[in-house]
Amino acid sequence: KAGVTQTPRYLIKTRGQQVTLSCSPISGHRSVSWYQQTPGQGLQFLFEYFSETQRNKGNFPGRFSGRQFSNSRSEMNVSTLELGDSALYLCASRDMSSYNEQFFGPGTRLTVL
Amino acid sequence: AQSVTQLDSQVPVFEEAPVELRCNYSSSVSVYLFWYVQYPNQGLQLLLKYLSGSTLVKGINGFEAEFNKSQTSFHLRKPSVHISDTAEYFCAVTGTGNQFYFGTGTSLTVIP
């Protein structure tokens, strides 16, 4: 099976812009989670989607949003970008029937100038 | 609520020496425990996992971990490290159907 894919891999934006990141889970996985990784904060949970519904949400401002499509692909959107949003954004998928193991994509490196 | 504490942010160790990366968790429910490794500019890769059964879990690349319920720990060990083990290591905990909680990571540097 193909792994989790994320596009784009690298992105440069300026403050105030918005950005959309995409994640395609492993075939058959219906759960997709998003994480923000920064050197000082480690992995911070953003949200999880399962069957097009958000089932868990981390402690991030409303500028961070997501959605999931019927084919389980997920997008994450960040509006009004701030310098502090520069990070590696990781997507992970899992099959809810197989003991919760998450499989991670390579990430999207977002730089906000 | 669940949480994970990785006690060491950085661990330097000489090549071929043993290493232990410490992880403690807090949870009021049954847990599943994981160790992930992240190489530079890559995503996270599963090293090993504890779901149930034997408390000693063996993973890839010669790593193993021991689940200790009384001490709420899940420490990662390797008897002899290689240069290629230099990476960031993350401990994680989850319960059935719940979200994952990650530690802040331990940077392992293997010194030739």
Image: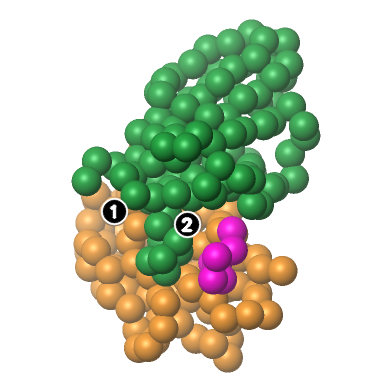
Chain colours: A green, B orange
Magenta-colored span: B93-99
Instruction: Tell me: residue A17, above or below residue A65.
Output: above
Q: Is residue A113 visible?
A: no
Q: Chain of mark 2?
A: B
Q: Nearer the viewer, residue A56 or B1?
A: A56
Number of residues whose C-alpha sits closer than 10 Å to that of mark 1, classed few (under 14), some (14–19) or many (20 or more):
some
Q: Position of residue A6 (x, y in %)?
A: 40, 30
Magenta: main secondary structure: loop
Image quarter in which the C terminus of chain A is found: top right
Judging by the rendered image, the residue that carries numbered circle 2 is B90
- Residue furthest front in the image: A70
Badge 2 amino acid: Phe
Judging by the rendered image, the residue that carries numbered circle 1 is B85
Task: Name the mark nearer the viewer: 1 or 2.
Answer: 2
Instruction: Tell me: residue B105, above or below residue B91.
Output: above
Q: Nearer the viewer, residue A50 or B83?
A: A50
Is B52 left or right of A79, judged from the image as shown? left
